[in-house]
Image (cartoon, rainbow, N blue to C red):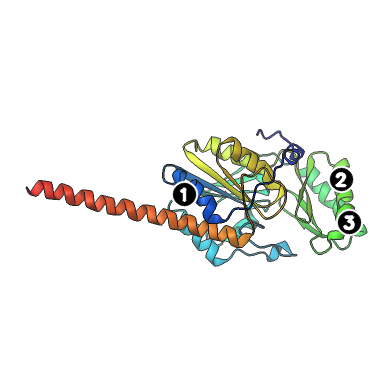
Amino acid sequence: MSAQHSDQDVEDSLIVPSPLLAQVILTQLNPVIYSHKLILFLDIDGTISEFHPDPTKNIIKDETLNTLKELQQYIELVLITGRSIAQAQKLIYPFDWNIAGSHGLELNYQSHLSHLIDLNSEQFELLKNYITEHSAQLPQIRIEKKDYSVALHFREHPHLEDLVHTFALDCLTHFQAFELKAGKFVFELVPKGANKGSAIQHIHQQAHLSDHYPIFIGDDLTDEAGFQVINSLKGCSIKVGTGNTVAQHRLENVTQVQAFLTELLTLFKAQQQLLEKSHVKTHCVIKSCEST
């Protein structure tokens, strides 16, 4: 899928895969795991971090961080998130990992920071001011001003969805350099063209990863563009939680994602042990032949 495809195009093509446990998905992936290099694209909120009413209070468990640290001995890892890179780095501290942040607008890849979409800074400041001035009509919503976008959260008040949606659409009529992304109890105004699919596509092409088998795990509507790109690359797309999706597989929750990561690490360690044993046996045979 090209970066120009809209979120609506994605939503219109959604399918409903059957829930599969982590072990079942990995059993299907075994031939690939043993024959290809892997790159894992991984969403954060709702995927490796449980939701919290206040997004600033989300955490990633130490167990998950440690598993990801070990996995990177065997695979390439890129976190794909709606959070800014700065916000994501706080969640994974003290690690410095590859991150595509702000819904694919900014990228920190191999310690090189770049922007994939241009931001109209003047319009962005005006947008933030407009939201501040006009949000008094919705005092219950939580306004999150990010580095490149503004998120309107209503997690504590889901009944306000229609009112928040109407307010967000009103903002767009005044600031047409932005577009609306719907998530779990949030509407976010982001620069046009920024999406996780375009970020994955950019990384795959610019980093020359055609020899890597791609996996993407995400939970939200904003991840669907990423699933479509992964599917076009003949990789593995995994949806976390309920809801329609274009992803090929499904895990039920954050706990199952952790189980998937742990089992994946176990498979790599087992593969390494087999290779080491094979090397030892081959070495012994060679030494034995030399001595005769």
Report whether residue 158 is seen: yes
Q: How far apart are the two marked residues, 2 and 1, measured between alpha carbons?
A: 41 Å
The one of 251 and 187 positioned closer to us in this rendering: 251
Q: Nearer the viewer, mark 1 or mark 3?
A: 1
* Number of marks present in the image shown: 3
Q: What residue appears at the point 69 percent right and 46 percent down from the top-left corner?
A: 16
Q: Secondary structure at mark 2?
A: helix
Q: Amino acid at mark 3?
A: Ser
User: Which comes sooner in the sequence, label 3 or label 2?
Assistant: 3
Q: Which residue is mark 1?
A: 75
Mark 3 highlights which residue? 135
Q: Residue 291 shows which numbered tag?
A: none
**Residue 154, horizontal then vertical, whole percent:** 81, 59
User: Seen from this angle, which residue lies furthest right?
Assistant: 137
Q: CA distance from mark 1 to mark 3?
A: 45 Å
Height in image: 2 above or below 179? above
Residue 37 place in picture, x, y as percent: 45, 43
